[in-house]
Image (cartoon, rainbow, N blue to C red):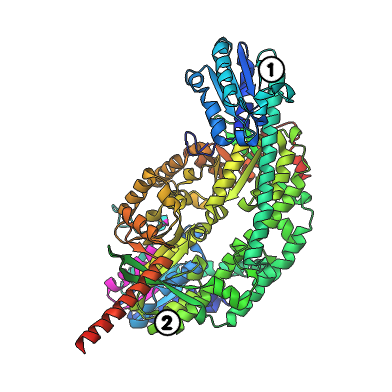
């Protein structure tokens, strides 16, 4: 298995661990005992997490010296398997736990309950019934997980439909793509600046990304349809959008696309006639000011096409940017080997919570990458900028950066007014 | 992917008089008596690995010469076998060199472009000084031979084009809807094929890891869309696989997993594993999850790493094993496959690796495979003993493919594998 020894892997449920343990116990059952505390019978307000944790904590010393093994089940029951000669200590512990809950009916009116507070078993004699019990807990947990997942499945789909509209179907996609071939999309093109930000939060523009606003496209063309509902149909749609973007970039010259710009395309588009026409029609000097953004799934769907296309465009002077990286993917993908010039890391508040180890990893990565090659995108608050700076990132993009630019423009405007007033 | 028409203009008709080779011979005849200042560069693109020999790559390579042809006395011939020939008169060698470097750069991943420091031989290109009688005669001989080959090749190409025509119209959003609908209502049980994955020991013999069950796309196409090329768009094909997943699951839920003797493996989308259809399968599988292997495509994984991680954890936790599929040996060095924490990584063997006798490349590949974890590696699409030897030489011991199926029969598993039931 590729992940042996990796502590980060999600833990199996306690129910499964218990079942596994009981199965292995068969060979060592002589002299072992089991006590089962039916804490699931406690009143709900007495079996909150912290209560159960406190109760379980009492077993710590016996777990520490390898006398026994504790399982805390989802229904709050505790299952303790131990060596028989520790019987007196275990009885003391169970007594202590009883005291914790002595005003709960489970203890106070034990004789009226369907189940006792604790049931004691001899692993050797009762092995079969213990195994059966463990099995039934594992089965129940399995069922619970399945039920949760299936509820989430339907619920998530329903919510997505209500919020974002009917999912895109092939029929609708065909209609959209036909409409797109003719539609004028220039009013749907949006521009976001990639900036460095100084200590006073004043932004300095480095280049801008041009993109077609999917939200506005949807509202213009297809109100009520969720264009991104199916990843693959959407990806196909982007190939049409690529062509439209290229033809707009070919036509528009001067003002609206001044300065260095970046835009997203598919690898297939770079190898198509449309790109060739675009490339033939822009000034050679302009290529050095253009950055081509690519997605990882597109790159890895046909690696040899990507390698060829990258060499082709870089040789012409374009730069290549890997878009849409997150913490997991940025560690996985060898960007140096891929010959990437720039990388965009998506901001996510979880990055801050991920701890020193992750911060250090990202700081190293930023340093290795080299000055100005890593961009933190989707920065929608100041925390993003502060975090980015703390790990050495100097370029930022997103709504918050746009607001800084607007603020900076206002400030300059005021300054100009002020100067004019002073002069007059 | 957009294809730039059918190869070069020369292949429009099968007429031997208008092939690029015959045009080139004409040209040579004309300059024969006054060849002063003439030279030829023969670029051996025909020797590229099949992956790198795609027509749109060759077209882009040919276009790299455009600036030279526009500005100097130079002509480019695109030969039928994909070689390029440049005929120049009084052009500075340095000017040609700089273009040649660009072309070489385009194929920098191909062993053909590797320069051997110790030798004067360059396998990528050959230069001829046409004013030198010997060089002229050599070159004329080479081209004459290629002209003969070209005629033969053109005939084959004409046949191939007919076959390509049989591939049919590309899959498009417009025809996707109908095909998808047909698939959704189709019973696929009789189209399920299986392939053995074996652990091969150097001493001979092998042990079955699992049988992969898959729906034969050739048969699907035959039945639902004989006129359509289902693989024309990777994204739309991926969309179809979501429907195929559900059809396959509908068959598998009928399986008696308690009686299943050999583990089976199926290809699914991550989204399918997180859906209700998979929960139905899981119910049928019950306590036999260890007999079921789930394979994911790298394109699907990279499209949403978070969902993949979640699906993988939930599968592994329940006892299923997970395979990362859709890789080739080349792609292993562009990301860290071990980071995907799957149980197995499947890489596809291709004829392009047969040439890898060079120690340095083999060594490099061995390191890549060792880093990715050779114990988790499966070499797929194994069609010859050569492939097995290649794999064993790199430390891989699990294999799958036509050749392995034969081997599995020879090893003679007398009993009827239970997995076959799903296929019959």
The quadrant the N terminus of chain B occupies is: bottom right
Query: Label 1, on which residue?
Result: A127
Residue at 41% in and 42% down: B367
- The quadrant holding residue A77 is top right
Q: Secondary structure at mark 1?
A: helix
Question: Residue B187: x and y, percent?
Answer: 79, 53
Residue B399 inside the magenta-drawn segment: no
Q: Nearer the viewer, residue A271 or A248?
A: A248
Q: Secondary structure at mark 2?
A: helix
Dot 1 falls on which chain?
A
Q: Nearer the viewer, residue B35 or A58?
A: A58
Name the residue furthest bottom.
A424
Q: Judge from the rendering whether residue A201 lies leftward or rightward of residue B162; answer left or right.
A: left
Query: Label 2, on which residue?
Result: A281
Q: Nearer the viewer, residue B212 or A112?
A: A112
Part of the protein shown in magenta: B86-110
Residue at 31% in and 71% down: B132
The quadrant the C terminus of chain B occupies is: top right
Q: Judge from the rendering whether residue B174 lies leftward or rightward of residue B149; answer left or right.
A: right
Instruction: Tell me whether circle 1 and circle 2 mark residues in contact (CB < 8 Å).
Output: no
Camera sees residue A316: no
Residue at 72% in and 60% down: B221
């Amino acid at each position: 298995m590729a992940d042996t020894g990796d502590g980060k892997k999600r833990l199996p449920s306690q129910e499964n661990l218990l079942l596994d343990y009981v199965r292995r116990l068969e060979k060592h059952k002589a002299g072992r005992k089991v006590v089962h505390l039916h804490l699931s019978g406690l009143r709900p307000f007495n079996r909150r997490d912290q209560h159960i944790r406190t109760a379980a904590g009492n077993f710590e010393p016996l777990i520490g010296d390898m006398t026994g093994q504790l399982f805390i089940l989802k229904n709050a029951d505790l299952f303790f398997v131990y060596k028989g000669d520790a019987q007196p200590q275990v009885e003391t512990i169970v007594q202590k736990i009883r005291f914790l809950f002595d005003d709960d009916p489970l203890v106070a009116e034990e004789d009226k309950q369907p189940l006792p507070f604790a049931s004691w078993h001899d692993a050797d004699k009762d092995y079969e019934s213990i195994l059966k019990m463990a099995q039934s807990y594992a089965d129940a947990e399995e069922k619970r997980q399945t039920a949760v997942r299936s509820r989430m499945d339907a619920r998530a789909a329903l919510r997505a439909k209500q919020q974002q509209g009917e999912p895109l179907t092939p029929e609708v996609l065909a209609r959209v793509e036909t409409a797109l071939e003719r539609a004028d999309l220039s009013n749907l093109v949006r521009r976001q600046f990639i900036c460095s930000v100084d200590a006073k939060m004043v932004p300095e523009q480095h280049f801008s990304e041009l993109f077609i606003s999917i939200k506005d496209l949807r509202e213009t063309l297809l109100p009520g349809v969720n264009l991104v509902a199916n990843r693959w149909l959407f990806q196909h749609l982007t190939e049409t959008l690529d062509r439209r973007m290229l033809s707009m970039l070919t036509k528009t010259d001067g003002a609206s696309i001044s300065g260095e710009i970046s835009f997203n395309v598919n690898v297939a588009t770079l190898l198509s006639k449309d790109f060739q026409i675009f490339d033939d029609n822009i000034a050679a000097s302009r290529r050095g000011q253009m950055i081509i953004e690519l997605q990882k799934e597109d790159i890895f769907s046909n690696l040899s096409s990507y390698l060829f296309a990258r060499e082709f465009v870089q040789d012409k002077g374009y730069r290549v940017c890997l878009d849409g990286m997150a913490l997991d993917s940025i560690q996985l993908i060898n960007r140096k080997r891929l010959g990437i010039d720039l990388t965009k890391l998506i901001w996510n508040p979880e990055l801050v919570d991920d701890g020193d180890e992750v911060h250090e990893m990202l700081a190293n990565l930023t340093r290795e990458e080299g000055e100005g090659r890593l961009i933190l995108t989707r920065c929608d608050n100041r925390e993003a900028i502060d975090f980015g700076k703390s790990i050495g990132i100097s370029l930022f993009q997103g709504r918050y950066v746009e607001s800084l630019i607007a603020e900076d423009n206002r400030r300059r405007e005021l300054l100009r007014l002020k100067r004019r007033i002073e002069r007059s | 992917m957009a294809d730039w028409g059918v190869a070069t203009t020369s292949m429009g008709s099968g007429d031997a008089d208008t092939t690029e080779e015959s045009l080139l011979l004409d040209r040579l005849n004309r300059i024969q008596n006054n060849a002063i200042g003439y030279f030829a560069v023969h670029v051996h693109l025909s020797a590229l690995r099949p992956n790198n020999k795609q027509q749109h790559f060759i077209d882009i390579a040919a276009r790299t010469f455009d600036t030279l042809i526009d500005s100097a006395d130079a002509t480019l011939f695109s030969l039928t076998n994909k070689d390029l020939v440049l005929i120049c008169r009084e052009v500075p060698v340095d000017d040609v060199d700089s273009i040649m470097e660009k072309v070489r750069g385009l194929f920098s991943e191909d062993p053909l472009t590797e320069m051997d420091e110790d030798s004067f031989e360059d396998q990528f290109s050959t230069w001829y000084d046409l004013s030198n009688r010997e060089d002229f005669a050599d070159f004329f001989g080479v081209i004459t031979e290629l002209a003969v080959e070209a005629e033969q090749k053109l005939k084959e190409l004409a046949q191939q084009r007919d076959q390509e025509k049989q591939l049919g119209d590309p899959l498009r959003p417009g025809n996707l809807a109908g095909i998808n609908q047909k698939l959704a209502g189709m019973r696929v049980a009789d189209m399920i094929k299986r392939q053995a994955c074996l652990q091969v020991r150097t001493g001979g013999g092998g042990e079955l890891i699992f049988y992969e069950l898959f729906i034969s796309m050739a048969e699907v196409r035959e039945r639902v869309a004989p006129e359509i090329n289902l693989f024309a768009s990777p994204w739309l094909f991926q969309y179809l696989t979501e429907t195929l997943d559900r059809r396959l699951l509908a068959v598998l839920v009928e399986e008696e997993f308690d009686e299943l003797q050999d583990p089976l493996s199926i290809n699914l989308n991550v989204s399918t594993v997180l859906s209700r259809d998979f929960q139905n399968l899981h119910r049928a599988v019950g306590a036999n999850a260890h007999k079921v292997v789930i394979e994911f495509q790298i394109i699907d994984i990279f499209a949403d790493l978070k969902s993949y991680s979640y699906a993988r954890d939930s599968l592994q936790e329940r006892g299923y094993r997970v395979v990362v599929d859709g890789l080739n040996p080349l792609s292993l060095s562009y990301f860290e496959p071990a980071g995907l924490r799957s149980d197995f990584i499947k890489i596809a063997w291709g004829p392009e690796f047969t040439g890898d006798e060079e120690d340095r490349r083999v060594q490099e590949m061995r390191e890549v495979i060792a880093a990715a974890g050779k114990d988790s590696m499966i070499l797929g699409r194994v069609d010859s003993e050569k492939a097995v030897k290649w794999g064993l030489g790199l430390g891989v011991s699990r294999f799958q493919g036509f050749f392995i199926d034969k081997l599995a029969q020879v090893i003679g598993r007398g009993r009827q594998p239970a997995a076959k039931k799903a296929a019959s």
